[in-house]
Amino acid sequence: MYEKDGYPESSASTGLPVGIMLLSAIIITAYLVVGSAMAQGGGGTVAYLPEAHVQ
C-alpha cells in the first residue's frame, strides 16, 4: 500500500505469498506421486510413434 507520502512501503512482508506457493508445490507434487503410484498397477497407456522415413 502507498503511505501518505506516495512512496511504496519499504517493509512489505512476502511470507504469505511464498508460503502459499510452497504449499501449492507440495500439494501438486503429492498429487502426482500418488497418481503415478496408482497407475503402476494398471496396464498403462502405450504410445506408438511413427517411423521416420528418409528419402
Image (cartoon, rainbow, N blue to C red):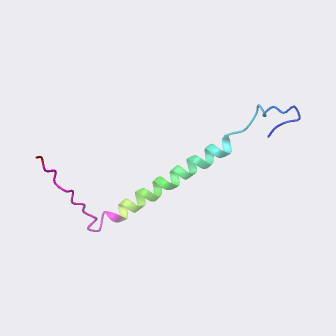
Q: Residue furthest bottom?
A: 42
Q: 24 or 45: nearer the eye?
A: 45
> Does residue 26 appear to the left or right of 9 in the view shown?
left
Q: Residue furthest right?
A: 4
Is residue 46 located in the magenta-colored stretch of the structure? yes
Is residue 12 located in the magenta-colored stretch of the structure? no
> Does residue 7 appear to the left or right of 50 in the view shown?
right
Q: Position of residue 32 (x, y in %)?
A: 43, 57
Q: Position of residue 16 (x, y in %)?
A: 67, 45
The residue under the point 36% across, 65% down is 38
Q: 6 or 39: nearer the eye?
A: 6
By secondary structure, the bulk of the magenta-drawn segment is best described as loop
The N terminus lies in which quarter of the figure? top right
Tally of marks:
0
Rendering quarter of residue 7: top right
> Does residue 14 appear to the left or right of 2 in the view shown?
left
Q: Position of residue 49 (x, y in %)?
A: 21, 56
Q: Residue furthest front?
A: 55
Give the residues in magenta.
Answer: 39-53
Q: Position of residue 52 (x, y in %)?
A: 16, 50
The residue under the point 72% across, 39% down is 13
Q: Residue furthest left?
A: 55
Instruction: Indicate whether 44 appears above or below 29.
Output: below
The residue under the point 28% across, 64% down is 45
Q: 10 or 19: nearer the eye?
A: 10
